[in-house]
Image: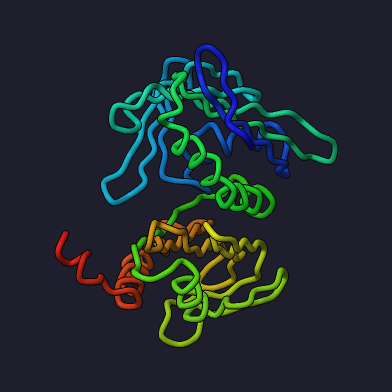
Amino acid sequence: MPIRSDAQKRWVELEFLVPGTPEQVWHAIATGPGISAWFAPTTVDERAGGKVEFTFGEGVSSSGTITAWEPPRRLVYEEHGWSEDAPPLASEFVIASRSGDRCVVRLVHSLFSTSDSWDDEIEGFESGWPGFFQILRQYLRHFAGQNAAAARALRVAPGTHAEVWKQLATALGVHGPNLGERRSAPAGAPPLAGTIEHVQQDDETCEVLLRLEQPAQGIALLGSYRLEDKARVAVCLFFYGDRAAEIAAELEPRWRAWLEARFPADAEQKANA
């Protein structure tokens, strides 16, 4: 959607439909255990004036202050210092009930600046959410309220975005995906098998979402994302149930080692390391 502006701020809006009651959706988008089950490890002090903190790994985190806490309908938090010299950023989630135990969630990111200097960042917020919204849908449909833990592996790979995606997808057995197909990773990769629930392929993003059967019940988002003349490769695995934390802790180092071996650092990366 286009960036909008007025005399005080610039913003983008997104709307998406998810399964679940307002109370289930509120738990998923406004509590620490809920957000951690589909996005990133998060803690939330559940009150107006409380703190929300996201941990993205690789030493990256972000925090904000809750400015509106209206369960199960509306959450707003404001982040300062989310990027160097950046103006404050407000994120507003509004939940509206629909028939058939579904909800529409409206998300607005507002940057308190009239300058267009941060438009790339605002557009990045918009483009970064869709894959995680797909995880949220699967979580609410199949795993809502269960214990959750995530394993993540990230890598910057030399080569074009299309080349890197072909390598990743072939190595994990998801090349040429079709919705509803069951796919499994070949020998040499960490264990991975499940049903394809979402596919996106364009100039900026290539990703496949699997609802997992192996190594455990959960969700896998496998993606390659254009990064100038390179690509960022990401494997995000969410596990659910009583053994979720144990499984995630066991598999995360295996995935990191596998990605490092599959996409070794080029000479420039080594020089800057």
x and y percentages locating residue 64 in the rendered image = 39, 26
Residue at 70% across, 32% down: 22
Q: In which quarter of the image is the C terminus?
A: bottom left
Residue at 64% across, 74% down: 177
Residue at 54% across, 46% down: 127
x and y percentages locating residue 18 in the rendered image = 70, 43
Task: Count every numbered label the image shows and give the total.
Answer: 0
Of 3 and 52, nearer the camera is 3
**Quarter where residue 196 is shown:** bottom right
**Quarter where residue 164 is shown:** bottom left
Residue at 51% across, 50% down: 147
**Quarter where residue 250 is shown:** bottom left
x and y percentages locating residue 189 in the rendered image = 42, 80
Q: In this view, does 204 lie above or below 257?
A: above
Of 204 and 101, nearer the camera is 204
Q: In which quarter of the image is the N terminus?
A: top right
Furthest-front residue in this view: 116
